[in-house]
Image (cartoon, helix red, strand yellow):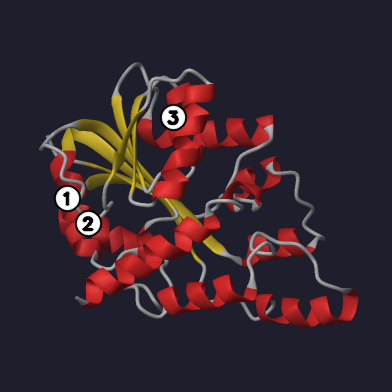
Amino acid sequence: MQNWSVKDDIRDYWSLRAQTYDLSPGHGIARHTEIEAWSQLIRRHLGDGEGRKALDLACGTGVMTMLMHGLGFKVTGLDFTEPMMARAKRKADDAKASIRFLTRDAEETMEPDGTYDVIIARHLVWTLTDPDKAFADWLRILKPGGRLLIIDGDFVRKHWMEKLLPLLDRVFGKQQDGHSLLTPEQWDHHERIVGQVHFKDGIRADDTVKLFQATGFGELRIATDLADIRRSRGISLLSRKGLASTLQHRFAISGRKPL
């Protein structure tokens, strides 16, 4: 019952966030240069699409789903938040993109064994309630030789300079960042969720590597410098957003299911 209540809380939170999710910097992808930067990262880890079957876990409003489709993958988007999925479906319909969508829990996909060539999950692992179970399920539904790509970051532990940003806001006025659109109630909801998930103290690249290894993935590719993504967004290092983005620990890690 405890896990269910946490997931119910997560579903409610992201349902509320659906309306403004794409407007928050780092969530939606608006610039051509950013699309290209994400495309290069995906190709480095997963290769070219070429009609291969891909699963976008916790696809939300379909940002990465549409990107994967544009790279030539045959994509399925999976999420358990209906308002997010509704926006993803509209994007696919508007683009006349043939994309399959599933309303399911990313920790227990219920997909058949050996279904996908690649799986991608952006900003999901830090929210998991049972990461060991989730990784085992993802390994199961990958084809032999298939790859899982995790893109995430530590959004809990803050660099000491990040802790000064609210003080600077009080001196110079509130500056916009990736979460400026959140209401105080949504922030409270967010903090309540963080306190209940498995990685409530934050997730690092090393934690994710251990999950890959413990599950049986091999041939890991690890990137902890995602500066090219930040630069593609046109954010100055001298800005509040640039400073916050630079100080956050972000990573992209992929692993291969053994043949």
Circles 1 and 2: CB distance less than 8 Å?
yes
Q: Is residue 4 visible?
A: yes
Foreground residue among 184 and 129: 184
User: From the viewer's perspective, is 112 left or right of 69?
Assistant: left
User: From the viewer's perspective, is 8 left or right of 201?
Assistant: left
Tell me, for residue 137, which label it has, or none.
1
Q: For the residue carrying disc 2, how many other residues have a C-alpha within 10 Å: few (<14), some (14-19), or many (20+)?
A: many
Foreground residue among 179 and 131: 179
Q: Which residue is denoted by mark 2 in the rendering?
A: 134
| Distance of label 2 from label 3 (alpha carbons) | 22 Å
- Quadrant location of residue 259? top left
Q: For the residue carrying disc 3, how many other residues have a C-alpha within 10 Å: few (<14), some (14-19), or many (20+)?
A: many
Q: Secondary structure at mark 2?
A: helix
Circles 1 and 3: CB distance less than 8 Å?
no
Q: Position of residue 254 (x, y in %)?
A: 34, 45
Q: Which residue is denoted by mark 3 in the rendering?
A: 68
Tell me, for residue 103, which label it has, or none.
none
Q: Quadrant of the N terminus?
A: bottom left
Say whether disc 1 or disc 3 marks the residue closer to the N-terminus: 3
Say whether disc 2 or disc 3 marks the residue closer to the N-terminus: 3
Q: Position of residue 49 (x, y in %)?
A: 38, 22
Residue visible at 59% across and 35% down in the picture: 37
